[in-house]
Amino acid sequence: MNIGLFGYGVVVSAVYEVLNHTPSLMASIAKICIKNPNKPRNIGSEVFTANRRELLDDPAINVIVEMTDDAVAAFEIVKESLQNGKAVVTANKKMVANHLPELISLQSLHNTPLLYESACCASIPVIRNLEEYYDNDLLHGVEGIINGSTNYILSKIFNENLSYPEALKQAQELGFAESDPSLDVEGHDALNKLCLLLAHAYGVIAHPSTLVCHGIHRLNAIDREVASAQGAQIKLVARAVKQPNGEVAAFVLPQFVKPPHLLHTVRNEYNGVVLTSALADEQFFYGKGAGGFPTASAILADLSALRYDYKYEYKKLFLQEPSVLATDVKLNAYVSFQDWQMLPIDAFEEIHEYYSGKSFHYRKGVVSLKKLKASDWWKQPGVSLILQDEAILKEQRK
Amino acid sequence: MNIGLFGYGVVVSAVYEVLNHTPSLMASIAKICIKNPNKPRNIGSEVFTANRRELLDDPAINVIVEMTDDAVAAFEIVKESLQNGKAVVTANKKMVANHLPELISLQSLHNTPLLYESACCASIPVIRNLEEYYDNDLLHGVEGIINGSTNYILSKIFNENLSYPEALKQAQELGFAESDPSLDVEGHDALNKLCLLLAHAYGVIAHPSTLVCHGIHRLNAIDREVASAQGAQIKLVARAVKQPNGEVAAFVLPQFVKPPHLLHTVRNEYNGVVLTSALADEQFFYGKGAGGFPTASAILADLSALRYDYKYEYKKLFLQEPSVLATDVKLNAYVSFQDWQMLPIDAFEEIHEYYSGKSFHYRKGVVSLKKLKASDWWKQPGVSLILQDEAILKEQRK
């Protein structure tokens, strides 16, 4: 394997370091393409270039590892690499989630593999296991904490009583959150990963923009108290759950989670995914979902898989009847709001409980996913929507 | 796939039921071989036979699922099936652990797959992940609770204050332990599974009889109190851990486990495996490790893998430099004993703490795995050996 690397961040240098210590992989890095090749680095400068053509046009390079933070450039690079018969390993969840249909057809057209285990939960081998191990007919649901930044922030809020701004600042200082945290805290990163899970769990190819998604940026101190009062923490949960009619309900929303829910045990920057199936019941995969070395670990596993010609077959899409997304899903929700005008009259299908105070009100009851999708009152400042511990109505779960 | 099934217990009927509800697998059960075909059952009698030749000699049967409880007969069946080019899926950990060298060479000689995911931790895909996903050079250790019966018994003792006989009886009544529980409570079942983990994690092929193993049958009520006093539970832990010199220390021994050790969260009949690696740090796989449906789930995953010609490549054995077993390993241990005569004078390398009462004494300190292997004073009634929370001396862990 003769590797061309794009991007040079903490993950790339971890990959570089590890490849040099893994002779059994028989892989070497021929060239690294970065924006600024003249910046001083701890690797010899001859390996760097700012010109992507030196990698893409080099016939000796047969594997591209793509780790830029630019989804547009990444797609161009991946597309051209596949067209030229170069296998690709990428960590770019946004790029994959946004271009899945093209990427699937490019792979099949050029018979060239594209692997992206590191793009979802970093070191946790969830994509590979969904693809290879869990038979669609029997998989009832995938529910996970798949964004480390938000889970770190929420853990600090609940376990150490930090405020949201304090927790966010700490996450940024430790490198668990970006300087522009919106991709994480608004749920988009988890949503991109959910799209990858959907493809490999159920053969559902959905563009992120078509799914209901909300982050943790609207949570307020009283929501936190409401959670604690019921023995719960708030977690940002991504899920794809089969309905009795065979359709799959998929969304990213904050949720009250209490013991013995396995996701309650997921702390700080860790990720955890619960797979529920007819036979195996609940299975739980837990590990580091972000960071240089955990991401490098997944990239290495993908490189290792390339060595024996592994490729995703998208089994649930091509070898089985793919599932379709559910639209008519009822959710158990809590909505807090500062002002009655913020809440549409038909926000709830059923109301089970309500509270009204001087400057803070909440309702608990049943909301419709379809209506959430069609509106955005629940995203405005001053409103906070959180799913209950039993998020999807029992009779709607397979 | 045209399947011939051996054995008819709770797992077989689960497999039968599930195959009939999984049309996408395109598999059908042609024949089931059992000891007593005339016993009334909930499946049509024409599918049953007591004559194994009706399966082994039928050229139309191309897959054998072997689920008998007889390791000797199982090996004959599996051997002949592989020789005749029939793919085999087995749940028989004892048979696989005892015959791994022959089974590996039979597979390669006849180019026919033998899969046994269900033989280790049932539904948890740990064999497949070790084989495919974790690169040997980077895997520091595998530590797991891989026997559901003993974990159920220990959970009841610690969480519900049952005595050992009470907890054992309950486990037997619920089907979590056999009527002859020795295979489980003496640690042999966990040991057999550890041999499978060793092969796929490190390319180490070890016969179970060569490894140090102890169960939970010697634990007494005072050990339980000592555990509780230090905030720990006792768990039966199987482990394969890389030493700084590259050798692998492997054994099954009871151990004090306290939070935040991930194995502390494994309750009742569940299994959990922690994989520690250089890059991904700790990863945790958790799920049901026994029972009809969880085992059927793994068998089904293996059948599904046969459909696309999956076979174990024993990568760590053939494509890398396999590791060797460590002999010189020092362990942090606690030993309780009723009588001073039970304890050899050189039992401990170092003593850190001791207690002496009227009819009960214990010592804590460092013991040598090599000496344990060469002696059996620590297995006699009235003696109980339990590893400390930090089981292997820190400087001996990679």
Image (cartoon, coloured by chain):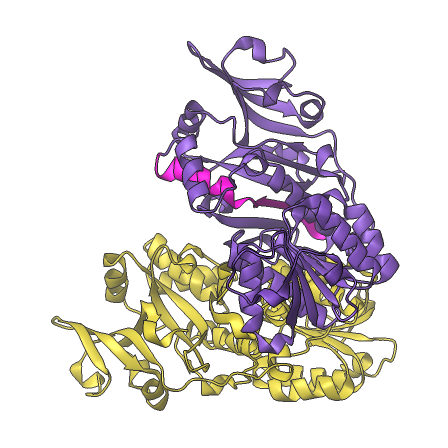
Chain colours: A yellow, B purple
In this image, A34 relative to A270: left or right?
right
User: Which residue is at the front of the view, A225 or B117?
Assistant: B117
Tell me the residue at 52%/60% (across/down): B41
User: Which residue is at the front of the view, A174 or A236?
Assistant: A236
Q: Quadrant of the C terminus of chain A?
A: bottom left
Residue B379 screen position, x and y as percent: 60, 23
Tell me the residue at 39%/57% (across/down): A264
Residue A229's image quarter?
bottom left
Q: Is residue B131 magenta?
A: no
Q: In this rendering, is residue B230 above or below A76?
A: above
Residue most extreme to the front:
B38
In this image, B157 relative to A87: left or right?
left
User: Which residue is at the front of the view, A356 or B324?
Assistant: B324
User: Which residue is at the front of the view, A21 or B275?
Assistant: B275
Q: Is residue B160 magenta?
A: yes
The magenta span reads B138-161
Residue B54's image quarter?
bottom right
Residue most extreme to the bottom:
A374
Q: Is residue B96 visible?
A: no
Residue A242's image quarter?
bottom left
Tell me the residue at 62%/18% (across/down): B377
